[in-house]
Image: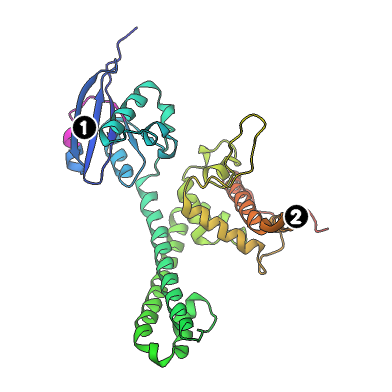
Amino acid sequence: MDKDSRFYVGMDIGDRISETHVLDGEGELVEHSRVPTTKSALERKFSAMPASRVAIEVGTHSHWVSRSLSGMGHEVLVANARKLRLIHGNTRKSDHADAEYLARLARLDPQLLSPIRHRGAQAQADLALVRSRDSLVRARTLLINHARGLVKSSGQRLVKCSAECFATRAVANIPADLQLALRPILESVAHLTGQIRAHDRQIERVAKDRYPESERLRQVKGVGPVTSLAFVLTLEDPSRFPKSREVGAYLGLVPRRHQSGDMDPQMRISKTGDSHVRRLLVGSAQYILGPFGPDCDLRRWGLTLAERGGQNGRKRAVVAVARKLAVMLHRLWVTGEDYQPQKCPAQ
């Protein structure tokens, strides 16, 4: 049997300094060192090393680190941090120990790391546009809630309206003693609304020019440009999922399970995967089940589920519709079929 001549490297990536633990094919320590978390430092460290298997944990820096190391000829495994109880459950956890565990798991069996695959550089940049829009929306919501709360505490209320027209409609209802405090808030809300609209236009262009498949997903009423593009960019390659049903689990929309013997309790959804896409799908599900949702099989199914679901039936129905919507969008993407909202006639 040939001796394994490869190195196995565990790398615990820190914001400024990363720990590296290098093993040979026999599992013996070759080197343990610390390296600055910069492109130049990593290039100096790993370009001189023979092709090795490098294990890192998913995180802020894992996208560019994995691309850099792969470009140098190394096999890079990006470990799913949620699955590494061996590391996070360690009672004597340290960066040194984490790097060693990663190296030993990479040498023993890569599947123990539950490796994930990062999206490409272009997809990552385009997804940043969608997430930046989300941050702008959150900031605007925070300011609107702040304004409404201040006015309510003075015994009055601001007019009910959408976030898009809040800055123009609320200005006439601000009490005189709060003008100085809230005028800058309304100006900021107006500015953020303009920025959000600019992002919406840019998202439309990006979807049309680079991701035409997202247009097919928008056949489903309630799925707009932002949701369809975020879905496509997050999954990136639909062939990763042999069955469309697996997409619901990937996005954390299926219940956790803790079965033991005769005990199999009903649990909340796992909430694994991308929280942003999951939130967008839930928003689409709420629209589908809401007063303006179009009549379709998905809406009928969800409303039936809500009626028989008891006290929390509506919440469960929204999550179930979001899960079914994720499966449906993947199916439309893979097959290229046209969406048929009403396969079954109304009863």
Amino acid type, mark 2: Arg
Mark 2 vs 1, N-terminal side: 1
Q: Which residues are magenta?
A: 43-54
Quadrant of res 109: top left
**What residue is at 35 percent from the left and 38 percent from the top?**
57
Q: Quadrant of the C terminus?
A: bottom right
Q: In this orientation, does residue 197 appear?
A: no
Name the side, left or right, on which 238 lies relative to 138: right
The local crowd at label 1, few if under 14, some if 14 to 19, many if 20 or more residues have their Cα within 10 Å, is some
- Image side of residue 6 versus residue 322, left or right: left
**Pointer 2: what residue?**
308
Q: CA distance from mark 2 to mark 1?
A: 59 Å
Residue 330: give x, y in percent of width and height. Answer: 57, 46
The residue at which mark 1 appears reads as 46
Name the residue type under label 1: Phe
Q: Which numbered marker is on residue 143?
A: none
Front-lying residue, 47 or 211: 47
Question: In the rendering, at what x and y percent does residue 39 appear?
Answer: 21, 43
**Left or right, 11 with reference to 270:** left
Magenta span includes 230: no
CB under 8 Å between discs 2 and 1:
no
Q: Is residue 46 magenta?
A: yes
